[in-house]
Image (cartoon, rainbow, N blue to C red):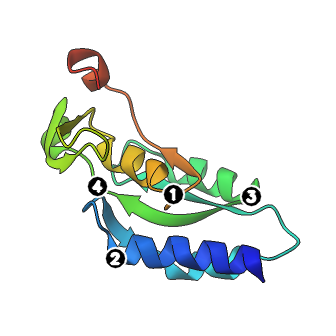
Amino acid sequence: MSRIREYAKKTFLAMKNPAGSVQEVFVNALDRIGEENDCQYMGVKNVRQIPADLVKKLEGKGFALHTLDRHSHNGRAVDYNLHNPITGRPMTGSSSGTAINVFLGINDLGIGTDGGGSVLAPA
């Protein structure tokens, strides 16, 4: 029961969305979590460049789609809408919401893209 409770807390945190980094929560992901299996939560940057078949493949490998994550406006290198939980400064890289959600423990894995924003504005 403790594992289910742990993942329920991750879902509650995603729904609370303290950093504004979650765009959508899939609460049914909790149905995939059990005491005996190794299923873990994943978040995906909400862009069309991440293929649905990649998400399906990862679901087949033991990950449950838990959140769609916010990203920087127009893929900009600096995300002025989301703030670094450690420094309080604007996040860098367009997959900023995905990174925050892994850092906060909402998700175990985050799928983002790398278009160079992290090079242009290193975190």
Residue 73 lies, in percent from the top left, at 14, 45
In the rendered structure, which disc, 2 or 4, sits on the residue that comes first in sequence? 2
Per the image, label 2 sits on a secondary structure element best described as helix
Dot 1 falls on a residue whose secondary structure is loop
Q: Which residue is mark 2?
A: 16
Name the kind of residue labelled 2 in the image.
Lys
- Which of labels 4 and 3 is toward the front? 4
Q: Residue at x 21, y 46 (%)?
A: 83
Q: Does 78 sit above or below residue 1?
A: above
**Taking 64 as reference, is 27 above or below it?**
below
Q: Earlier in the sequence, mark 1 or mark 4?
A: 4
> Could you say whether the residue bearing mark 4 is in a helix, strand or loop?
loop
Residue pointed to by mark 1: 105
Looking at the image, is mark 1 or mark 3 earlier in the sequence?
A: 3
The amino acid beneath tag 1 is Gly
Res. 110 visible in picture? yes
Q: Amino acid at mark 3?
A: Gly
The answer to which image quadrant residue 62 occupies is: bottom right
User: Which labelled disc corresponds to residue 60?
Assistant: 3
How many marks do you count on the picture?
A: 4
Question: Which of the two marks, 1 or 3, is nearer to us in this view?
Answer: 1
Task: Tell which circle, 2 or 1, labels the residue nearer the N-terminal end.
Answer: 2
Residue wearing tag 4: 70
- Answer left or right for 28 relative to 51: right
Q: Position of residue 93 (x, y in %)?
A: 27, 32
Residue closer to the observer: 86 or 115? 86
In 3D space, how far apart are the residues under numbered discs 1 and 4 (Cα atoms)? 16 Å
Tell me the CA gap for discs 2 and 1.
13 Å
Disc 2 to disc 4, C-alpha distance: 14 Å
Mark 2 and mark 4 in contact? Answer it, CB < 8 Å.
no
- Image quadrant in which the N terminus is located: bottom right
Residue at x 33%, y 41% (from the top left corner): 95
